[in-house]
Image (tube, grey):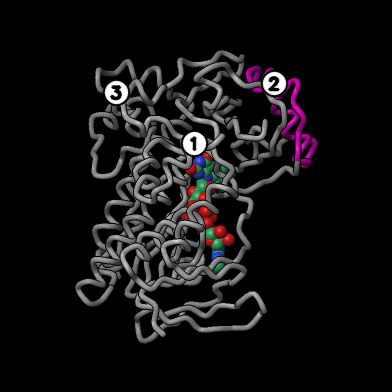
Amino acid sequence: MIYDAAIIGGGPAGSTAATLLAQNGRKVVLIEKEKFPRYHVGESLMPYCYFTLERLGLVEELMASDVPKKYSVQFASQDGKISEPFYFFQHQDHPSSTTWQVWRSDFDNLILKRARAEGALILEETKAKALITTGDRITGLKVTNKSGVEEEIRSRIVIDASGRDNFSANRQRWQVRDPKLKKVAIWTYYENAKRDPGLDAGATTVAYLPHKGWFWYIPLSGNQVSVGIVAERDYLFNGSTRELSEIFEREIQNNEWINEHLRDARQVGQYRITGEYSYRNKYSSQDGLVLAGDALGFLDPVFSTGVFLALRSGELVADATHEALNRGDVCASDFVEYGRDMTKAIETMRKVVYAFYDEKFSFKDLIMKGPNMRSDLTNCLVGNVLGRSFESLFESMSELAELPSPSPHGLSMADTPAA
Ligand SMILES: Cc1cc2nc3c(=O)[nH]c(=O)nc-3n(C[C@H](O)[C@H](O)[C@H](O)COP(=O)(O)OP(=O)(O)OC[C@H]3O[C@@H](n4cnc5c(N)ncnc54)[C@H](O)[C@@H]3O)c2cc1C
């Protein structure tokens, strides 16, 4: 049997693509190496996740759940002073201005279940091992199923949504690391940490550390909070200890807001770490293969862009695949627009991330630069970045911070002269 689509990975990108393709009557198989629900970092959503979640039919369930609602992002200086929150509803009076702080085990499982309900075949505890190539075209996957048996799956397109495992790009040596965004993240969870009152109870707080390091503080259900540090490796490991718990305790003392919010809290579970994590792959598609979510590229998580980009890319890939199959075949040329749209959106957010880390830059100075600055910036912070240009924002930003020159990577192979 030849599937219309074989999808690697049941995270937000893969499950979204699987749901929408199956809804359109396509024969879909999704291969996931873990058994869901499984742990995943990345709990804070962006407002513009709403539109994909609405298409997936999941908004009502999220609205009715006990998942904390996120109305804003706020910034806390080292001495504990908190900024005026960026309330999303002040920017746009629309249900999408309310978003959520989710346990990813539950959230990802919700979308995976949706894909299954629409008729996608979900093979958990099954691992993709190799791409099958016929001539220059990818025509399927070799997988190991949960009994350890190798199988071949044939499909008209392979959608790689394998996350930061970056399955296909690693095999094709497509990964290009961002030269500047070489941070390390250490994170853990706390019970009984302080919640701000009223609308701010579910806010994401970005709390500064020296040299533009920062804490995230994400209130979750079950009286828990996700707390993480992102900073340069040299800064985090410059002291006498390499123990993650000791580094964490040391840094808590470096931000008064975090210190105060964790004073009566109890740390739970393990400390986790990841490093060197911003990259973009050279190509987003070749004949028979397209990449989505973190398997296309990963951007520093300071603005919680990851799940949004995963959902949106899953959606765009599903639509482009469906249309291509309607025409008869699916090739790299069918993903030219997809590659351009995603690359432009990622480039937009990458500039804001670069500005954030520039020691001279502050949002306050940027907003003073002109009447459109606050609204343009908020469009970036909510995820309203696809199909938009932000020329005047970046012109002003470049007077305050060193912005990156555009990366050429992430386009379809059919859209690149060097291919
Ligand atoms: C420290 C840190 C903090 C973050 N914080 C945030 C945040 O607050 N908000 C936010 O929006 N984003 C955040 N992110 C990013 C977010 O986690 C990702 O962008 C998001 O999970 C991407 O979704 P995805 O579907 O592309 O991949 P994933 O969610 O990673 O899903 C990929 C799936 O593929 C499976 N898989 C991998 N390889 C194989 C294989 N060979 N065979 C079969 N299955 C395979 C994996 O098991 C996994 O289930 C953060 C990331 C990091 C590292």
As drawn, the label of residue 64 is 1
Give the answer, above or below, for where 11 lies relative to 215: below
Give the answer, above or below, for where 220 lies relative to 252: below
- Tell me the residue at 49%/67% (across/down): 8
**How far apart, in angstroms, are the residues tagged by discs 2 and 1?**
32 Å
Q: Residues within 10 Å of mark 2 (few under 14, many from 20)?
A: some
- Tell me the residue at 65%/23% (across/down): 258
* Image x and y of residue 122, in percent: 51, 68
**Is residue 358 one of those drawn in magenta?**
no
Which mark lies nearer to you, 2 or 1?
Answer: 1
The span shown in magenta is 240-268
Q: Quadrant of residue 413?
A: bottom left
Residue 347: in sight, yes or no? yes
As drawn, the label of residue 373 is 3
Residue kind at label 1, given as amino acid type: Ala
- Tell me the residue at 53%/29% (across/down): 204
Tags 3 and 2 touching, CB below 8 Å: no
Q: Residues within 10 Å of mark 3 (few under 14, many from 20)?
A: many
